[in-house]
Image: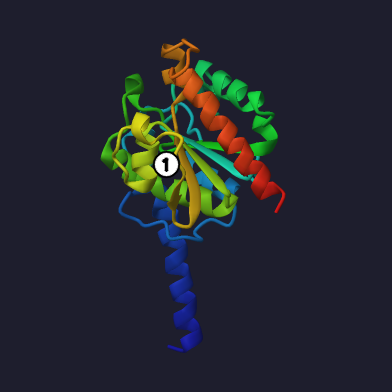
Amino acid sequence: MSSENQLSLFEESNFEQKDLIPKNAKIPIPPGSYANLTELAQHCNQCHRCGLGDTRRNAVVERGNPKALIMIVGEGPGQNEDETGQPFVGKAGQLLDKILASVKLDTDRDVYICNTVKCRPPENRVPSTEEMAACKPYLLEQIRLVDPKIILLTGATAVKDLTGDKRGITKIRGQWMEWEGRLCMPILHPSYLLRNPSREQGSPKWLMWQDIQVVRNKFDEISNN
Ligand code: SF4
């Protein structure tokens, strides 16, 4: 067999391997698997790499600007997200939009929003380690394609999934950390703020206000360079 024929066989097997990605969590998703976010979303919408694919209505892949400087990563879709196919659109999402607007960041223009798992865990439970591991390569591809300069990790699950850091969110929120050469900040999850409405100094809402101002300053610093 000529080397040209051998090469074409190799390409064909690669193509088949890529088709298997949404079917089997053992199939790797190497960096560069997707040419764009549309291709990635198509795979997520037909994905059964974990059991969450069996119970979802819609895969929830993204919202916002795919060229944004800031990426926000949440835990997983809830009921509203499952119904609409968009992340952070329920009460917590509306609060997130308000938090961003308080420092003049626009959700459609300045941020790209996604989740650690793209399908809703039943009863809004925390996604399992296996589910997060099956879905993480999609997140890594989103990060590669969007190429954000700042990643905000909302809540302990998102921090653990991306960075492996298992510390409590109240200990590490508001602190810059570096992950794979990217600037990340753990922040409180908006749904936690909904459960803690106080605005007193030291309250979750007050802490979020401090953190989002730091993020805005960093955003300005990066934008002006
Ligand atoms: S949660 Fe992720 S890995 Fe699991 S089925 Fe949905 S898209 Fe696939």
| Residue placed furthest toward the bottom | 2
Tag 1's secondary structure?
loop
Ligand 1's quadrant: top left
191 and 59: which is toward the camera: 191
Percent x, y for residue 224?
A: 72, 49
Residue drawn at x 32%, y 44% is 165
- Which residue: 58% across, 52% down? 147
For label 1, count other residues whose C-alpha is less than 10 Å away and answer few (under 14), some (14-19) or many (20+).
many
Give coordinates of residue 39: x percent, y percent. 56, 49
Can you give x and y, in whole percent of width and height, for residue 19 in the image?
44, 54
Is 74 in front, or is 166? 166
Q: Answer with left or right where residue 209 lies relative to residue 164.
A: right
Quadrant containing the C terminus in the rendered view: bottom right
Q: For the N terminus, which image quadrant?
A: bottom left
In the image, is residue 12 above or below residue 120? Answer: below
Left or right: 147 with respect to 14? right
Would you name the residue on which mark 1 appears?
Answer: 47
Q: Is residue 49 visible?
A: no
Residue at point 58%, 48% (across, down): 37
Q: Position of residue 75 (x, y in %)?
A: 41, 32
Q: Is residue 57 visible?
A: yes
Name the amino acid, label 1. Answer: Cys
Q: CB at mark 1 closer than 8 A to ligand 1?
A: yes
